[in-house]
């Protein structure tokens, strides 16, 4: 059994059992990958994959155990390489982050600016996506850190650390009838078409459930994953926007009014996550602390020893999280 065979195996699985796609990712030939997989199966004495002709159709139950062990082996190899890099070059390396548009656009710029001043030789790679896409990137070991809100169930075997809390705001053009409300209510909001994030709010309750609890039904005009897109359509008069409060910038959005909705919608917590088997380099610890002052090295190491999100939440229960 050879290490490159395990790499081929994991690449094939991560590319949906598509050998051609795996070969392209590995910068090798499709026949070469097929040959090495067959040699691995011959050595093991059982099939890892079921086949129809030359196509792989599914992973066998015993094959799944091999895949999981191969993934752990490759993760450990990556950790060993990072350990070596730490000894040879504390200030250099790379850091890949998967996050949502809101975090990348409105929260991370200042964090990254400060981090770059401290570590100019670290290559930063920022990947934007949905929670589902970020979870897949983390599972495939394509990113080091995931930063998102809610959706914790999509990140098993991941240490999730709280960063900050935030509220929703309602964005409307200046002069809109809602700006004359002394205190925004769901009843007043339900009178207008709503432009919101796709699907549902992350957090304890969905948008429909919040309105339904008040005996109301929201009029959804448009959904989008991008706060900038939501604000664009608010400006076009398609409806009122419900966005993260951090997505309203006083200067750039001076034509809009942000109405406080913290008493209507639940408070949310944005978190940063990494796989429990990840070896964190010094600059990774410092990036985490730049995200939140409560995430010092001692706290991060203690949190990664805890096995459940509930235990981590309890550990940070007394920490003062910033409110954005």
Image (cartoon, rainbow, N blue to C red):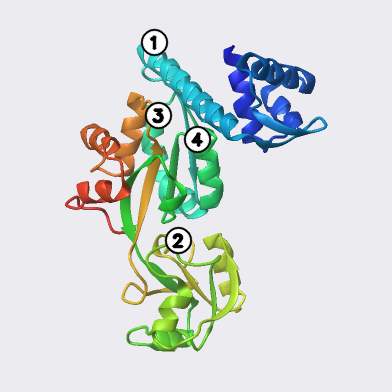
Above or below — where is 242 with respect to 14?
below
Going from the N terminus, do you reach mark 2 or mark 3 first? 2
- For marks 4 and 1, give the CA distance: 22 Å
Label 3, residues with CA under 10 Å away: few <14, some 14-19, many ≥20: some
Residue located beneath label 2 in the image: 247
Above or below — where is 18 with respect to 103?
above
Label 1, residues with CA under 10 Å away: few <14, some 14-19, many ≥20: few
Label 4, residues with CA under 10 Å away: few <14, some 14-19, many ≥20: many
Going from the N terminus, do you reach mark 4 or mark 1 first? 1
Residue located beneath label 1 in the image: 88
Task: Return the residue nearer the eye: 183 or 86.
Answer: 86
Residue located beneath label 4 in the image: 143
Above or below — where is 230 with respect to 15?
below
- For marks 2 and 4, give the CA distance: 24 Å
Mark 1 lies on a secondary structure that is helix
Q: Is residue 316 left or right of residue 120?
A: left
Badge 2 vs badge 1, beta-carbon distance below 8 Å: no
Going from the N terminus, do you reach mark 2 or mark 1 first? 1
Task: Return the residue nearer the eye: 182 or 37.
Answer: 37
Label 2, residues with CA under 10 Å away: few <14, some 14-19, many ≥20: many
Residue at the (55%, 66%) spot, across then down: 199
Image coords of residue 189 (percent x, y): 45, 84
- For marks 2 and 3, give the CA distance: 31 Å
Residue at the (21%, 50%) spot, across then down: 314
- For marks 3 and 4, give the CA distance: 11 Å
Residue located beneath label 3 in the image: 278
Mark 4 lies on a secondary structure that is loop
Mark 3 lies on a secondary structure that is loop
């Amino acid at each position: 059994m050879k290490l490159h065979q395990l790499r081929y195996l994991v690449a094939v699985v991560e590319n949906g059992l598509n050998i051609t796609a795996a070969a392209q990712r590995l910068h090798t030939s499709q026949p070469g990958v097929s040959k090495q997989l067959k040699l691995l199966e011959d050595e093991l004495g059982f099939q890892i994959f079921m086949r129809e002709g030359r196509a792989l159709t599914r992973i066998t139950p015993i094959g799944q155990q091999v895949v999981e062990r191969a993934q752990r082996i490759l993760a450990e190899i990556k950790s060993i390489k990072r350990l070596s890099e730490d000894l040879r070059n504390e200030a250099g390396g790379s850091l890949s982050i998967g996050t949502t548009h809101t975090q990348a656009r409105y929260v991370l710029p200042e964090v990254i600016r400060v981090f770059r001043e401290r570590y100019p030789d670290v290559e930063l790679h920022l990947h934007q996506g949905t929670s589902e896409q970020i979870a897949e990137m983390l599972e495939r070991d394509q990113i080091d850190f995931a930063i998102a809100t809610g959706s914790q169930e999509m990140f098993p075997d991941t240490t999730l650390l709280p960063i900050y809390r935030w509220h929703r705001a309602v964005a409307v053009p200046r002069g809109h009838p809602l700006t004359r409300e002394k205190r925004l209510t769901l009843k007043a909001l339900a009178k207008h078409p709503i432009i919101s994030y796709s699907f549902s709010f992350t957090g304890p309750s969905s948008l429909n459930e919040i309105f339904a609890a008040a005996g109301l039904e929201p009029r959804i005009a448009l959904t989008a994953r991008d706060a900038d897109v939501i604000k664009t359509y608010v400006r076009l008069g398609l409806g009122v926007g419900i966005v993260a409060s951090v997505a309203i910038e006083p200067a750039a959005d001076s034509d809009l009014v942000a109405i406080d909705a913290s008493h209507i919608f639940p408070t949310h917590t944005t978190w940063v996550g990494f796989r429990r088997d990840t070896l964190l380099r010094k600059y990774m610890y410092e990036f985490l602390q730049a995200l939140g002052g409560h995430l010092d090295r001692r706290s991060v190491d203690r949190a990664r020893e805890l096995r459940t999100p509930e235990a981590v939440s309890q550990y940070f229960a007394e920490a003062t999280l910033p409110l954005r």
